[in-house]
Image (cartoon, grey):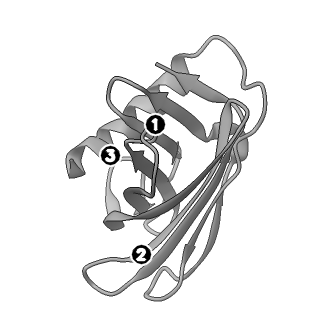
Amino acid sequence: MRASFRTVILAAGTAVLSAARPHAAPNPMTIVVANGPYAGTYKARADEVVCLHAKAQKMYAASFKDFNANSPRAFAEGGLKVNNPDVAGPKKGDLLAAFGTSDKRSVEYNVFDVPITMTTKGQGAELAGSGKTKDGVQIRVTASCVDVTTM
């Protein structure tokens, strides 16, 4: 399951690069790292955030990848994945924030199986989740998915 989140982000990034249509609307995403050497608030470029609802894979995700990240401290990728989004009841999922160049990570923060707030709005959704990494770094990811690719 942990490797699949990375696959989702890479697949979503590839889909964005190869998509012929422009985004109908931006999908804002903010990642807050509360402590540690990369503490701060990071805003992904909303027009480059991909929201994906993969029904067969039972997941909903918002992801961002900066293919031009060129420094060890650059915000390279981030996202939030909701497991079983179409099942009624509380949601759980995974969070990611990674820093470094597009091909080499300096730091990668992953949090797995944390409570996720998912509020559907028309075809889109408001997503939020927070948790601590195994090293005690607190992260929070929020995303507003307006333009969603459904598979």
Question: Which mark is first along the chain, 2 or 1?
Answer: 1
Q: In the rendered view, does 44 fall on the left or right side of 72?
A: right
Residue 70 visible to the viewer: no
- Camera-side mark, 1 or 2: 1
Q: CA distance from mark 1 to mark 3?
A: 18 Å
- Camera-side mark, 1 or 3: 1
Q: Nearer the viewer, residue 18 or 59?
A: 59
Q: What residue would you read off at disc 3?
A: 5
- Camera-side mark, 3 or 2: 2
Say above or below: 48 vs 123. Answer: below
Q: In the rendered view, does 56 fall on the left or right side of 126?
A: left
Mark 1 nearby-residue class (10 Å; few <14, some 14–19, many ≥20): few
Residue at horizontal 78 percent and vertical 32 percent from the top: 25
Task: Name which residue type carries label 2.
Answer: Gly
Mark 3 nearby-residue class (10 Å; few <14, some 14–19, many ≥20): many
Q: CA distance from mark 3 to mark 2?
A: 16 Å
Q: What residue would you read off at disc 2?
A: 131
Say above or below: 41 vs 4. Answer: below
Which mark identifies residue 86? Answer: 1
Q: Position of residue 49 (x, y in %)?
A: 61, 41
Q: Quadrant of residue 93?
A: bottom left
Task: Name which residue type carries label 3.
Answer: Phe
Indicate the secondary structure of the residue bearing disc 3: helix
Question: Which mark is first along the chain, 2 or 3?
Answer: 3
